[in-house]
Amino acid sequence: MTEVSQWLEQLGFGRYADVFAENDVDEEVLRELTDADLEKLGVTLGHRKKLLKAIAGLADAHEAAAPTAATPDTAVMEAQGAERRQLTVMFCDLVGSTALSQQLDPEDLRELLAAYQQICSDIVGSGGGHIARYIGDGLLIYFGYPS
């Protein structure tokens, strides 16, 4: 008994096993059957609907069970040294910096921002973080990358 015949028996459609075998319907062909194909094989409307649903479930189960091959995107990521990791991203900025910029001279504002950035850098570094980018008075910070 073929796998298709066994599958049909399990579903309660064993009466169609001979027709499937006579028409060379194997596992590969089974996944490609359409409603029109099943009708040509003499499958009744109700059974066609049930079979198509079971075939779709079979295809989904086959895809889920199949070993995952590297997709081009995955292959590219691996070649570039990409990896999955836990990452925390933080953005912080100086509250009220717009008002400060209107009140302070440019030189004083520059000194204030430099001091603020140095303090943030020290704190982030002590926490194991990495400042990825300075954006005006803001900082984009990563924790967990690079390690």
Image (spheres, helix red, strand yellow):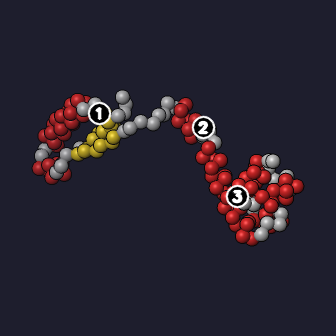
Give me the residue at 56% from left, 38% from top.
Answer: 74
Residue 129, label in figure: 1
The amino acid marked with disc number 3 is Leu
Give the percent coordinates (x, y) of residue 78: 53, 32
The residue at 16%/42% (across/down) is: 109
The Cα–Cα distance between marks 3 and 2, rounded to whole angstroms, is: 34 Å
Question: Which label lies toward us, 3 or 2?
Answer: 3
Q: Which residue is mark 2?
A: 70
Query: In this rendering, which labeled residue sits more in front, label 1 or label 3?
Result: 3
User: Dot 3: what SS?
Assistant: helix
Q: Say what amino acid the circle numbered 2 marks.
A: Ala
Q: Is residue 91 above or below residue 12?
A: above
Q: Toward which corner of the image does residue 39 lie, by quadrant?
A: bottom right
Q: Secondary structure at mark 2?
A: loop
Which callout, 2 or 1, points at the residue further toward the start of the chain?
Answer: 2
Q: Earlier in the sequence, mark 1 or mark 3?
A: 3
Q: Position of residue 64 (x, y in %)?
A: 60, 46
Residue 1 place in picture, x, y as percent = 81, 48
For label 1, the crowd category at 10 Å Cα-Cα, with few meaning under 14, some 14 to 19 and many 20 or more, is: many
Separation of disc 1 and disc 3 at Cα? 57 Å
Position of residue 25 measured from the top left corner of the image (x, y, whole percent)? 81, 53
Residue 118: quadrant of the picture: top left
For discs 2 and 1, the disc positioned in front in the rendered view: 2
User: Cα distance, mark 2 to mark 1?
Assistant: 32 Å
Q: Nearer the viewer, residue 111 or 43?
A: 43
* Left or right: 17 in relation to 57: right
Between 100 and 40, which is closer to the camera in this rendering? 40
Is residue 114 in view? Answer: no
| Outermost residue to the left | 103
Which residue is tagged 3? Answer: 11
